[in-house]
Image (cartoon, grey):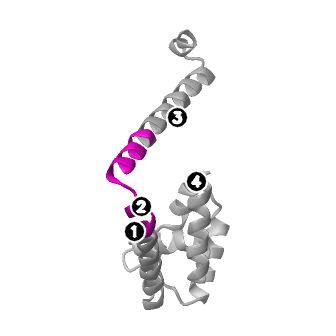
Amino acid sequence: MLVDVFERRREMLAAEAGITVEQWRVLEEIGSRRFMPSMFARRRDSSAAAVSRILRQLLEAGLVSVAISKSDGRNREYRLTSSGARTLADLKHSREAAIESVWMTLGASEIESFSDFAKKLVRSIEEYSAREASLRNGTPAARGSR
């Protein structure tokens, strides 16, 4: 439920900026200066064609520019335009305002309790996943630990 709320809020922020969540992710990646479309597609479990479509949309909207790489003519370098940088800054500001409005109203002990719970939950999920992976791989230690 919490993940759904966060995702809906991210969708709302993106829509207010006139972009999609996936376009926002690509803008953030381009803004970090480590953007490689093929690597981005792989990390996001997306197709190269889908990333190309998003890039075309961002180019058409004037949020990014593209040039042939000076260091390797086979590659393209994507950069935020001033409009793209402004859009990303506005999104960051909106997200920070939401965090301020929601999280900062909670007491320190509430945040600490939530953080402790989240860490325990993550650890439990990771341990479960490791056990399940071991069982699927037929590891003898995993069979005995069940």
Q: Amino acid at mark 1?
A: Glu
Q: Vertically, is 105 above or below 143?
A: below
**Residue 91: x and y, percent?**
47, 77
Mark 4 and mark 3: Cα distance apart in space: 15 Å
Q: Residues within 10 Å of mark 2 (few under 14, many from 20)?
A: few
Question: Which residue is painted at 51% across and 60% down in the image?
Answer: 39
Q: Amino acid at mark 2?
A: Trp
Q: Residue at x 36, y 75 (%)?
A: 71
- The disc at residue 125 is 3
State the CA–CA distance, disc 4 to disc 1. 19 Å
Please report whichever mark, 4 or 1, sits nearer to the chain's N-terminal start.
Answer: 4
Which residue is under mark 1? 100
Foreground: disc 4 or disc 1: 1
Q: What range is drawn magenta here? A: 99-117
Q: Amino acid at mark 4?
A: Val
**In screen coordinates, is 113 left or right of 10?**
left
- In the rendered structure, find residue 3 and report the number of the disc placed on it: 4
